Amino acid sequence: MILLVLFVALGAGLLVLMYLFVQSPEPRAEGGAQALVQARNALSSLQTGLLPAELVERVFAKDDLRFVASSAGVKVQEVFLRERKRLALSWIAQVRTQVLSLKEFHSGQSRLYARLDVRTEVAVALSFASLLILCRALQATFYVRGPYAAPRMVGFAIIAAAKVCTVFEHSLGFLPRTSAEVLRRDSPGPHVAA
Amino acid sequence: MLTLTIWWATIVLELAILLRAFKTGAFKEFPSFCIYLGCVLLSSASGYVVYRMRPLQYQYWYWTWEFVCVIAGYNVVLEIVERGLASHDGARKILRNVALWGFAVIVAFVAIHSMLFRHSNALISSVEVERELRTAEALLLAAIMGAVVYYRIAVGRSLKGIVVGYGLCVATIVITHSMRSYLGAGFQDYFSAIRSWSYLFSLLIWTFALWSYQPNPVPKGLGDSGTDYDALAMTTREAVESVREQLGKAARQ
């Protein structure tokens, strides 16, 4: 019976993969400036739009909740909590989207290299997968327990933003000169993307 | 009557695909696939004659040809790797090595299995051997499609059709063989019907995909440098790890 389940699951899994294979979107131009610009924008969006201390602190701080609780009725508090929860969910959804964009940047660049290392690629794929799962878990936490389920998000988010900024600046540095020039020309830059 | 109609329909479609492949030049691009289809055509046509003239011999005839077709099918998988990832050397080398190791394991498995089960029921052991062989093919096809989806590699309509049609065949065989092994001879009629219909569907996909040959798009490469790849991989991993670590800590608060 176990063998039957395993083989049926394998066959069904292959059919699902075939569906994804047929539905897979048209790829970007390989190594094109567009990919670099998108990666830079995704990074800028994370650094300056989604993870800055002021924004995250404001979204998840309890000061506003305390103020509403002390000066407004139950209905107003309910509306406030509902709106703040929606904001928290929207924030984590956008973080997830930008992480997906960085993943696409990596896979779009690495597929062109002949010296592709299977262990490295599997490790990177697993890292992205676990990060995306973590984003989903945070979404679920906010959804079930509300927007104040992770109050110390602020400090950690600041450190994460700083690290991401440093390492991806390096990664953009070694890319071909022509692409980098186009990138500088086309990219709106972090201050504009924010 | 319906079974015989499907039988004839598959023979006609196989002939049509092969003729179109010769005419459009797809034969030069996918020789292993055309050889595979030729094997299946010979199997179907000669099987029909044997079924009519010597019904008792048909079972042995069928399984002999089935193993020839499995080996030819394995070459189709190798061809998919070579053609589908022709412009992506790194991924192609990895999958080619996986496929060759897989082939070695298959040959070893069949040899050991045939020695161990020489005296058991021939039909049951044949079903099981083919199921194992097709399972290896299914895993390889899954790896190929996974690589194409993950790296968003552009694949032409012709090759896409070959992959989907062959994948459908393999998935159906893996599922129906495992059910045949588990449920026994009572499942035989369903087994034959499902296989016939799914193969007919695969042939229709191949007919559509190969009616006019469409080559794979050729990407513009960046050139290659091991140092660049190492740097790319390292920086990506560091970035992902740092974000995950921070979000993980936050989630635990």
Image: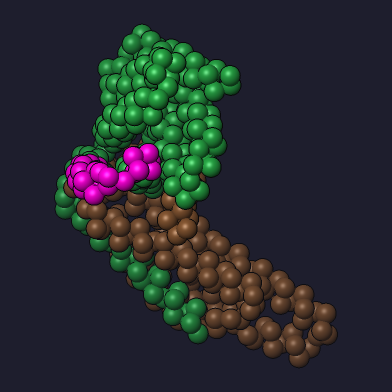
Q: Which residue is at a point 71% across and 71% down the rendered structure image?
A: A83
Q: Residue furthest bottom?
A: A70
Q: Colour of chain B?
A: green
Magenta span includes B107 = yes
From what the image shows, is residue A154 above or below residue B59?
A: below
- Which picture quadrant has residue B66? top left
- Image position of B3 (left or right of A187): right
Chain drawn in brown: A
- Which picture quadrant has residue A74? bottom right
Q: Which residue is at a point 77% across and 75% down the rendered structure image?
A: A79
Instruction: Please provide the residue range marked out in magenta.
Output: B99-127
From the top left corner, tell me how far across and down residue B167 is, in percent: 42, 37
What color scheme is it?
Answer: by chain
From the top left corner, tell me how far across and down residue A182 is, in percent: 34, 42
- Image position of B30 (left or right of A77): left
- Image position of B30 (left or right of B100): right
From what the image shows, is residue A99 above or below residue A157?
A: above
> Is the magenta region chiefly helix, strand or loop?
helix
Q: Which residue is at a point 38% across and 10% down the rendered structure image?
A: B19
From the top left corner, tell me how far across and down residue B125 is, in percent: 34, 44
Q: Which residue is at a point 32% across and 21% down the rendered structure image?
A: B39
Magenta span includes A143 = no
From the top left corner, tell me how far across and down residue A53 is, in percent: 49, 76
